[in-house]
Image (cartoon, rainbow, N blue to C red):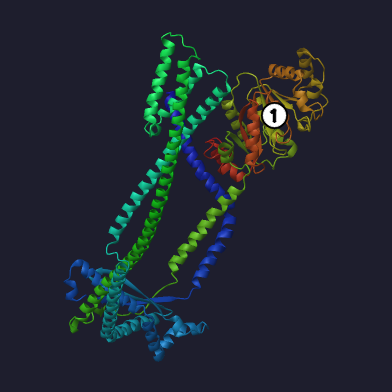
Amino acid sequence: MDLEENNNFEKLTTKSKKNKTFSEFLLILRDRWLLSVTLALPFSLAYVYNELQVPEMFQSSSSFVLIPPPQILNLQKVDRDQQVNGLISKHLDGLNSQELRMNVIARINENTDYKTELLAPYLSDGTPMKIQSIVTYNISVSSPSEGRPRFKINTQSRTGKGAMIIADLVQKEYDKFNSVKKTEQVQTAKDILELLLDKSLMEEDRILKEISDIKESNDIPFIEDEKKVNSSKKNQYQQKITASKLDQIQINSILRQILDIRKRISSNNEIMTKSSTNSSVDVESNIAQIKQYFEIDVIEGFGSIPSLRKKLLDLELERKSFVETGTGYGINHPKMFENTRQVQEVQELLGKEVTFAIEDLRDRHIQLDAQEREFEGAMDKVQSESRRLGLIEEAISKAERTLTVVRSSTDIIRKRLDDVRIEAALPSEQDDPLQKDQLAFEGIRFSPDYNKIKQQGFLIFVGIFLIVPIALEVIDNRVKSPWDIETFVGEDLLTGIQKISEIDEFRRPKIVGDDLDDSLTESFRSMYGKIQMNSRVSGSRSILVTSAIPSEGKSLISANFAHTCANHGSKTILIDFDLRRPGLHNFCDESNDAGVMTILNTPNATEKEIIEKLEKALCNIHPNLYLLPSGGKTRAATEIIEKKEFELLLSSLKKLADVVIFDSPPAGLFPDSIALARKTDEVLFVTRYGKVSRHVVKRLIGDIRVTGANILGIILNDLPSKKATGYYYSGYYGYGYYRYKYYSKYYSQTDT
């Protein structure tokens, strides 16, 4: 059952939102309908008047039909279409020609009746005009129907007869012009095309001869073959140059190795010479260094080096045998000395052979360098030949492209010449396939279009009538509607309080208490019911009432809401916490000698003392309703709120009453309300109709929400009567509209 009720509630809510949008729109129009009419009516009437000032214009028409002869119709479809399109293009050019227009103007000037008919409307307006300026027509071609295109001559004039005259003359003059000029035009076209064809063929021959002369003068019958030969030479020379460079690099590397070995051997010999001892170790070291020559392929097989290598190896083996067999030969032994001497001789001979090898390598390097330069010279010649062939190829290619264009032009000329020859060969009875179709008729008025002007004027009126109120509503961003509160601000609208200007200012806080206005009392009862639904506190609770700026009716709402709570059986305490400018005691005819300030200014007061002072300061102003005045003025309200005595006061108030209502300063001017919101359970925000910007209300609500207080909703105060009855209740609170409409009538009826 609960689920079904929730679904029904959601459906009603959705329907209410849809109706709300329509109601908003109607209200916006109702509020500003007079301004909308004031702006829309002049604009729409001005547009209609301006459009009606356009002079009357009439239009007429005549036409030709193109009937292709059998010779064309019997062609293939592609050829037939081309032939028909050619005829269409020719006649379209003729009908739009300046020569035809001048002929029509001449005929009008020759005929006094025609001239008078066309100029009469302009003369009556006092606007002198010439025939050349008023003869206007245009040609349209309809899509071929059964292969018969239709040329329609559309004319316009200030009179119906004038439009007919122009259409008739254009048709007659072109019929005459076409019949006289056809044969002459065809022959002229044929002569011109034949001349162009001869010139085009001569140009082809000239270009072909130019290509032939280029090849002959350069002795190049086939340019591609020459390019292939030149490319082959280029590759061969490049390979030779690369091989020569690699050989030179290899020789340089070998020379560096040989010179490094010579340098090490020379250094070792100097050391041995300076040393007084000729040790066996030094000789063996020298032999080991000499062997490095044999690791180089070029040295190993050069001259007598192989035999010297063998001899050095034998001496080395002999020396080792003296040491390993244990003969006891010392370094200064004659045999050892002789062996050393022979090693030195071999070394000297090797040095000479190595020198010869180095010279030989250097000679080879010089030869390779010369060979490289020779091939580079040949390569330059090949490159030059490549550039020459490229220029020749470019010249031939340019000539061939020109030849292609000329040949294409030749084909077009030849085809066009064939078309002309076919046209010239037609039988005489079919010499002119263009026939008159529709004759000119008296013109029909097409401008101004009265119905269209009326419709557009009405649309302009409706558009301005609708746009102006909506635009003004968008520009005016003050809080004025439930949409502003529930959609933009994002809070619940508790109620809308109607204007209370008819009630005395000092009695307004007692509207509910003294039952001064039944409809306003019902508004506060409705607000009370919705607050009960939105409240999250069970038991005794404290409610802060604040607004954005002064004069929004915050104190009025606080007092009447307090009376409403008291009437519903809740013991209520209304506190004047506007410590900067207290005023509730004046409305209730009470003294402000004791109150919040006197209670909180008692240092180190106990809860018992607070309650005692509170009971003395409370003023019973209505059954179940008590007023706690401010007890003075101060600008240090936030410091008072932070005192521990305030916490004792707040807890004491909740013990004494079911509902504690704080009337506070405006939240947009002073921080008192924000500080107090942290201490109270719930917050009511009051805003006056058309007083505060939506953005300001949204920002202040956000600041209050940061404190953690539960915002019960927003009360929209000081509504115009028409809005309260027709908008703010209808669709939002169900019974609201009917309450305002039928409330007085219901209670005025006597029981029957």
Answer with left or right where residue 1 lies relative to residue 192: right
The answer to whether residue 669 is above or below residue 603 is below
Residue 353 position, x and y percent, is 43, 34
Quadrant location of residue 204?
A: bottom left
Residue 563 position within the rendered picture, expressed as x and y whole percent measured from the top left: 68, 28
- 685, above or below 342, in the image: below
Badge 1 is on which residue?
674
Pointer 1 local density, CA inside 10 Å: few below 14, some 14–19, many at least 20: many
Name the side, left or right, on which 212 lies relative to 497.
left
In the foreground, 630 or 122: 122
Q: Is residue 207 visible?
A: yes
Q: Nearer the viewer, residue 130 or 289?
A: 289
Q: Is residue 513 visible?
A: no
Horizontal side of residue 367 vs 430, given as left or right? right
Residue 657, located in which quarter of the rendered image? top right
Q: Position of residue 577 (x, y in %)?
A: 75, 28
